[in-house]
Image (spheres, rainbow, N blue to C red):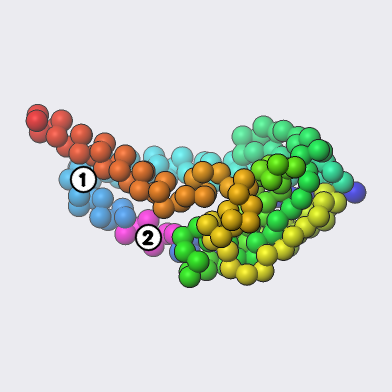
Amino acid sequence: MEAEFTPTFATYRRALRGVVPAVAVLAVIDFFRLHQPPAVYAAEWGCGLALLALYLWLYFRNTRVTAALHSLTIRNAFGISHTVADHHLVSAIFVDSFTQSSQYVANNRPRLFILDGDGRSVLRWGGQTWTGEQMQSLATTLGIPLTALNEQMNARAFKKLYPRALSPVEAHPVVFALVIVAVIATIVIAVVLNGRGL
């Protein structure tokens, strides 16, 4: 029996509650640090937010996951579909509470990993837009074994159990974040020094 799954905006709206205040604080800090004319600054943030809103609209409008017994087709935000070969649909891992920051801080977001025979993920679902019920229902529809991890799990602990399931970014989120910060800082310093003619 075929089933179609779509991302849940209500779940995403709950996830935004903790993000919006942080973004607002960052916007205010950037305003005083960058010393740009208010109109330019507002235009930059306006364009960024407009692009984000457009992507979210496309994501919730187009994203679909269609499943049947040993059959999985994924359509992304841009309407591009691909079908996962049935021999790659080997097992499913459901994590009730997954966090990539610390094992001591739970964000109460479930994660689902559909793994192939080598233990690599062919599909990852996060609790920002998908519910735990959808995740477990997907595994049931695919007819593959489902392992449920009910304890809180971070990337390091999960990687010990399933070393190939996470991407390098997911497996080392702190390192990736530091690299991003370093790159942004380097660009800002270069722009400031160039503007001063140094």
Say which residue label 1 marks. 34
Question: Which numbered disc flags the more N-terminal residue, 1 or 2?
Answer: 2
> In the image, which disc is placed on residue 22?
2
Which residue extends farthest right?
1
Q: Residues within 10 Å of mark 2 (few under 14, many from 20)?
A: few
The answer to which of 197 and 17 lies nearer the viewer is: 197
Q: Is residue 21 magenta?
A: yes
Residue type at the position of mark 2 = Ala
The answer to which of 43 and 145 lies nearer the viewer is: 145
In the depicted structure, whether residue 138 falls above or below residue 108:
above
- List x then y, in percent, for residue 61: 64, 44
What residue is at 48 percent from the left and 69 percent from the top?
105
In the depicted structure, whether residue 93 falls above or below residue 97:
above
Cα gap from disc 1 to disc 2, whole angstroms: 18 Å
- List x then y, in percent, for residue 189: 20, 39
SS at mark 2 in the image: helix
